[in-house]
Image (cartoon, coloured by chain):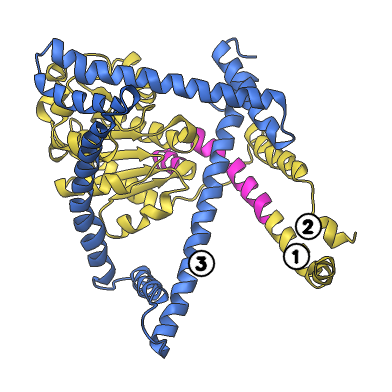
Amino acid sequence: MGFFEKLGQIDTRIIYVLFILAILIPLVTPLGLPVTVSQHTKQTYEIVNSLQPGDTVIIDIGISYSGAGDVLPQTVAMLKHLMAKDVKVIFTGVQMDSSKIIEDLIRPYEEAGKQYGVDFCNLGYLAGGENAIAAYARDLRKAYPLDSRGNSTDTLAILQTVNSAKDANMFIFFSTQNADMYVRQIAEYQVPIVGGLIATIAPQAEPYLHAGQLKGMLVGLRGAAEYETMMESPGIGVASMDAQSIAHLLIIFFIVIANISYFATRGRTQPAKEASQ
Amino acid sequence: MSRDPVIWVSSIVTIIAFSYLFKENELYKAVEHLYVGVAAGYTLVMGYNNVVSKVWTPLTRDKNFVVLIPAILGLMLYVPYISKQYSWVKRIPIAAIVGIGMALTARTQIMQQFIGQIKATVGPVKSINSLIILLGTVGTLCYFLFTLKPSLPVKTGSEIGKWTIMVTLGAAFGAGIMGRISLLIDRMFLIFRDWIPLIKVR
């Protein structure tokens, strides 16, 4: 077997080990590669930054634990921004994991003195996917008779002034599923919509941004890093970017290697295959 | 090392799950079954909580009898498991679910995804991006024209469409890789920060 054949048949286990090292080493010893901020994130930061203290936003947590690693850091960053600006937040969720994720998100702020029911509330998971979004967008208290802690939503101060999507100053969603159902059900209420998406589905949501149906969009862990950079408050996102970049370089390297091997051996392997047939 | 048993369990299970990359083994198979069992149990608990908060409490505390309608419709889905003779009953709630879902989606789909997107695509070309989107959309539509004779404009459009589709697939694949790496980074934080404190970032 020649050099190029061997190159095309590297043991995948070697690639896995190299891949894990390419991620782990930059996490342990950060390289400090610069994080450039994309237009999407700038636009998102500016629209969120335009909110005034006392404004109320609805945040839908459409995150499942399986995809949380990509979307949760941007949720943490944006919530930090909103809390610093004293914006009130109504949390909703259309994923089974939503209630628990929301509780984890609000706990530090509750411990720091923010008041549940006044500064934020957790309405929890509502089954039904797109139907659930349509239902709570029209009437929050009707769709959610109780919040996730068992309180009657009629008693929550935050819901006395905002009871539908049209009453909110902004609708924000974080999703590991898609952006389609949010745009379909919320856009008609004429409220600015901002989305945070898992990287795998973000390209499908680009047309909504171009059309102005989404006013801002964060894309995966990269979006979190950019948002943290805009906030000048580095966190998990920024810390992960070195690892992300090195891993991408490694993938590009192996794509090049595979193609070199393919083109160098194409003429040689073809007759052998034909002979075996 | 962490003293939190949850961190220990999740880290060890993660490592066992990754062991599949090297070779399928008995521990991996055990974790796979464990995952299915836990997921089923979790779904059951969430379903129970949903019934309590959306049906039982409004019914008993607020005397809201309207919630009985969706509750009965939901129960009708289980009739085939009790009686084969009356299994047709399940068609009623399924018809309601499909009908309501279709009506909700179709109405807003036409407004937001059809008219909204067409307006944004054919609207005034103000930037190079708008021009690329316009050409890419028209080209892709040409690529899927199967009933017209292939004339020069259609062929050119089709070629543009083919390239647009390839670029789109490439972008989706790249974004897919980025997303998967993020998930791996998240697992690295669990093992090498929360469990074994090698990574210092909080």
Q: Toward which corner of the image does residue A149 lie, by quadrant?
A: top left
* Residue A103 in view (yes/no): no
Q: Is residue B17 left or right of residue B135?
A: right
| Residue in view at x 23 percent, y 38 percent | B97
Residue A232 percent across, percent down from the top left: 43, 38
The residue identified by callout 2 is A8
Question: Callout 1 environment at 10 Å: few (<14), some (14 to 19), or many (20+)?
Answer: some
Chain B shade: blue
Residue B141 percent across, percent down from the top left: 36, 73
Disc sitting over residue B89 in the figure: none
Which sits in the foreground, A72 or A223? A72
- Please report, as a chain letter, where disc 1 is located: A
Quadrant assignment for the N terminus of chain A? bottom right
The residue identified by callout 3 is B166
- Please report, as a chain letter, where disc 3 is located: B
Magenta-colored stretch includes residue A234: yes
Q: Main secondary structure of the magenta part?
A: helix
Vertical arrangement, residue B126 with respect to residue B200, above or below: below
Which sits in the foreground, A229 or B78? B78
The residue identified by callout 1 is A262
- Range shown magenta: A223-252
The answer to whether tags 3 and 1 share a subunit is no
Name the secondary structure under disc 1: helix
| Residue in view at x 54 percent, y 40 percent | B182
Q: Give the mark, 2 or 1, whose residue is nearer the N terminus.
A: 2
